[in-house]
Each structure stands twice: as structure tokens, then as C-alpha cells.
Amino acid sequence: MSRVVEHLENLIRIPSPSAISNRAVIEYAERTLHAAGWQTVRHSYQDSNNIEKINLIAAPAGRSASDPEVDTAFFCHTDTVPYALAWTGALNPTKHSGCIHGCGACDVKGFLACLLASAESPETQQCANVRVVLTADEEVGCTGAKHLLAANLLHPNKLMIGEPTSLHPARAGKGYCLGRITITGHEAHSAHPDRGVSAINAAAHLLVSLEKLSADLTTGTNPFFQPPFTTLNVGTIQGGTAKNIIPGTCSFQVEWRPIPGPAASQVPAAIEAAIKEQRLARPRIGYAFIVERQQQGFETAESSPLVRTIETLTGNPAIAIPFGSEASIFAEVCSEIVVFGPGDMTSAHSDRERVDIAQLHQAVSCIRSLMQNK
């Protein structure tokens, strides 16, 4: 069995959904890195539920893991999404059809296994000025990466973020933003509607305005993306207390995935403008809008040496990704960012999750060359 396959199977067996501590994954990585002569330093924090989470920075022999000045950093998150109890193979990796199946196989323990196999390879014992950075809580808002950025612990020139891209260097990605709108009316018996004001009816009017906003967003395009515009979605809605009560409250989440540029901040302003219109039309209704998450998109130049090098090493052209990643967190502090990794995101977050073994080996070869600055 190859080392990358061995590492991945071991990592899949370690449960690491975001709701629990990632300590076990960090300890596994530390043992592997220390055995290969790498130095590590931990940066821990408590999440909102007082659960310990750990970010890890590792440097090759002869380099200090505490030195923030870095040429190339390789980022990989250590958490997975929750898995269904009915998925009996979630923590029991299996091989068939040339793939390894299991929770996190491609998102993103496959990339972590590639990093560890690359780091312990004899060819990388004398690496360039690189770091391996393992983060917590990516799946619930990139919290670990935000802690690292706020602490000013890394100043990388180039950054590779591990995500499943089928080994295409993703040089651009949409951001991820989320907000919640709460509408307050007045409850009354449904037999006397004149004595109440329906928050659900008011929400319906606002949703029509947001539908128009969604259509307006299609006019600002970036042809490198598919779809080439900022998307907007209302994914959840709650309201009312009983079938015979005029609903006094209604709330819903609105999500937008902005193309790189000003769209991330323009959308909240447009939502506020739509709410202002509704306030004028319905003065008895209360509206509150809170932005819960706001990550910009990112775009690295087509001519970037990092992009060109990965294209040459893999034979794959650069792409754009439609999903959010930690790249958005560090876009303003790095000159070049690429999202890269084995596997296809279409199988992730499901009991179909898998990663192609051949891609694992090719990724190790690519990462090893980058670590040696070849």
C-alpha cells in the first residue's frame, strides 16, 4: 500500500465533523511530520460551544514554524461535514473502481494525505521556505483560518488551498455570504384579520423584491465562472405559530455567492434598499437584517507563476470554482492563491464521497515539486 493511501485510510477512520474537537487529526499529522523532521507549532482556541479547536503550522527542517515570512504555504482544513448515521461506511474506508470511499475522502482528507506523504518523502527533506498549515472549522465559516489571519501568524507570498478540483488549479472562486432577515408583524385571531398584521404576507412581498434583485445580479458577469454572475438564494424560512393565528414573526436566510469584485458588499446594500421600500409601503411591519457571513471572492491572474507551474505539472488548465473556500480569507494578503486537490466536489457532503487513487499519487508528485521549488 502506498503511503498516501495509508494516510488517507487512517484519516477517514478518525471522526472529525466540525461539532467535535479536531485534536485527533492534528495529533496524527504531528506524528507524521515530526517523524519526517518537520517542526510544528499549535494555535488553539475555543469555539462557540467551548470545544477546543487547533490550528497547526509546520515548517521543514531548518525553518522555524513561528516565522511568519513564507514563500509558499499549503493550507488544509481538518473538519468534515456531519455524516448520516445510515452511512455505515463513513468511517470505514473502502476501495473499489480505483477510488477510496469514506467521509472526507475528497473534502478534504485526500489532500491532507497528499501533504503528509509529500512532507515525509526523502526528496522534500530539504524544502524551500514553505509551510503546511492545518486549520479547524472550515465547514462552519472558515473560523480557524480567520483566527490565523487575525493573529498575524503568516505572511505567505503564494498559497495553495486544498479542496477537490480534480487536480485543476482553481485560480478564481466566488465568495460566500449569508444574512438573516427577521420580519415582525402583529398576532391576532385569524377570524379577525383586521386586528393583526401578517409577517408572512410581508415576507412574501419582500421575497418578490429579492427575486428581482437576483435577476438584476445576472447583468454583472465574469465569463470565467459558471454561472458567470453573483447568485442569490433564500434557502430557509420560518414563520407563524399556528394555523389560526395571524403570524407575528417570519424570518429567513438569504445567501449570495459573489463573483470577485464589489458584489459581496453591494448585495447587502441592495437588500437594505429593498427593505426600505417595504417599510414605506408597510409602516406597521418591523424589519431587521443582519449579515452573518461575508467572504469576498478571489481571482489570481492567469499569468501567475504558481498557476502556470501547476498547469505544467498536472497538464490541466486553470478553472474557477463556484464554492467558497479559505482562499477568500487570505485573498488580500497573498500575491498568488490557487485552490487545488484530488477528487470532485460533486461527490462530497454525501455517502457517495470518494477520491480517485491515481489522482492522489499525481497530487503528491505535484506538491512535492512545489515544496522543492522546482
Image (spheres, rainbow, N blue to C red):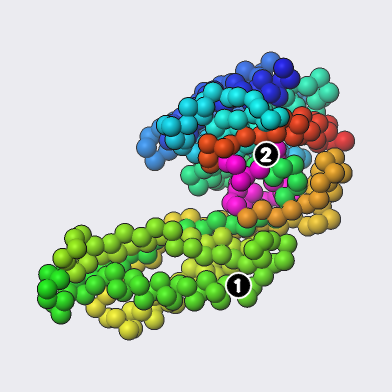
Element class at badge 1: loop
Regarding residue 69, the answer to whether it shows in the image is no
Compared to 96, does 254 lie above or below? below
- Label 1: few (<14), some (14–19) or many (≥20) C-alpha neighbours in 10 Å: some
Real-space CA distance between mark 1 and mark 2, rounded to the nearest whole angstrom: 30 Å
Regarding residue 172, the answer to whether it shows in the image is yes
Quarter of the view holding residue 271: bottom left
In the image, the segment drawn in magenta is 323-348
- Horizontal and vertical percent position of residue 275: 39, 75
Quarter of the view holding residue 10: top right
Kind of residue indicated by mark 2: Gly
Rendered residue at 59%/66% (across/down) = 230
Residue 229 on the magenta span: no
In the picture of the structure, the residue carrying the numbered disc 2 is 343
In the picture of the structure, the residue carrying the numbered disc 1 is 218
Rendered residue at 84%/55% (across/down) = 303
Kind of residue indicated by mark 1: Thr
Residue in front for this viewpoint, 135 or 256 = 256
- Horizontal and vertical percent position of residue 166: 72, 42
Residue in front for this viewpoint, 138 or 356 = 356
Rendered residue at 33%/62% (across/down) = 251
Of mark 1 and mark 2, the one earlier in the sequence is 1
Left or right: residue 194 versus residue 270 is left
Compared to 47, does 263 lie above or below? below
- Numbered badge on residue 205: none
Rendered residue at 38%/74% (across/down) = 206
Quarter of the view holding residue 236: bottom left
- Horizontal and vertical percent position of residue 357: 72, 30
Element class at badge 2: loop
Work out which quarter of the rendered image holds the C terminus and state it.
top right
Work out which quarter of the rendered image holds the N terminus and state it.
top right
Left or right: residue 370 versus residue 351 is right
